[in-house]
Amino acid sequence: MEYLEFERILSTKRIQRYKDAANGDTRKAMALYRYNLRLSQEMFTIVSCFEVALRNAIDSLLVPSLGEDWLKDSVQDNGIFSNGRMNETRKIIEKAYNRLNRQGNYSHSKLIAEMEFGVWKYMYSSLQYRATGQCLLRAFPNKPRSSAAVQYNNTYIFNELDKVNSLRNRIAHHEPICFRLHEAEIDTSYIINEYQKIQTLFSWMGIDSHSMLYGLDHVQSVCAKINSLKV
């Protein structure tokens, strides 16, 4: 495709940052845009696998103590998330449950699958963590032991999950992830850093991410291709 047609389809404003990063080289700008899409696909796959692993681990920890329908029950009268201070979590769960119920399609596993990443992140906020019995750190059995310098507690996990959630949202909203923040400069350090953090979280969960993502993970090679376009 000719560059002008490429620019017309994607918009001048959207493609300008890529063109600036390529120092006006339109061929490189098009290649950079495509590699950014590849990188977004790669990272979204990894984030999605992590999300499924996390929600399954949380569910496995809560079913024995709260029952097979714990998520639905959590927003009923006197449910663990009925406290007004957990209103946003309750609304998300209620909306998904009501939709499935209207369709006659409710099951616990389907309700679990309907939850967005933010719900699982907030399971590690202070309120939800206490409401669920303060057991969810067991989803990360291999995490380091806390020290005077670093407390590897629910707040630490919440903050790490918040970073994953932010990355997920950036990709979902089609934001570029191949640049230095707010600059038209090629820089994959943010993605490499987030990629390594997710690998660390997998390892803390006792999951061999390299085996699980075999054939799916090409993040490093795509980053290398992006970096090769630096001018």
Image (cartoon, helix red, strand yellow):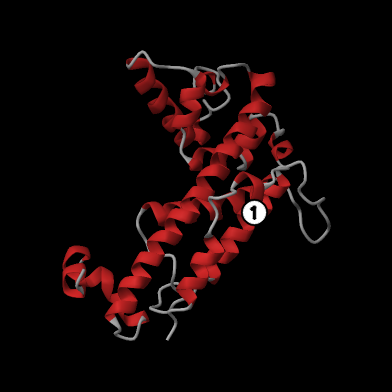
What amino acid does circle 1 point to? Gln
From this view, report whether residue 223 is shown above or below residue 100: below
**Residue placed at 42% from the left, 31% from the top?**
91
The quarter holding residue 54 reads top right
**Residue placed at 71% from the left, 49% from the top?**
203
Dot 1: what SS? helix
From this view, report whether residue 85 is shown above or below residue 202: above
For the N terminus, give its image quadrant.
bottom left
Q: Is residue 208 left or right of residue 96?
A: right
- The residue that disc 1 covers is 199
Q: Position of residue 136 (x, y in %)?
A: 68, 36
Q: Position of residue 96 (x, y in %)?
A: 40, 27
Q: Nearer the viewer, residue 35 or 188?
A: 35
From this view, report whether residue 2 is shown above or below residue 151: below
Q: Is residue 170 left or right of residue 208?
A: left
Q: Nearer the viewer, residue 17 or 64?
A: 17
Seen as rendered, the residue at the extreme top is 104
**Residue placed at 77% from the left, 58% from the top?**
150
Q: Position of residue 72 (x, y in %)?
A: 50, 20
Q: Is residue 20 left or right of residue 57?
A: left
Q: Nearer the viewer, residue 182 or 24?
A: 24
Visible in this render: residue 51? yes
From this view, report whether residue 7 is shown above or below residue 151: below
Q: Residues within 10 Å of mark 1 (few under 14, many from 20)?
A: some
Q: Is residue 45 left or right of residue 206?
A: left
For the C terminus, give its image quadrant.
bottom left
Visible in this render: residue 180? no
**Residue placed at 47% from the left, 51% from the top?**
44
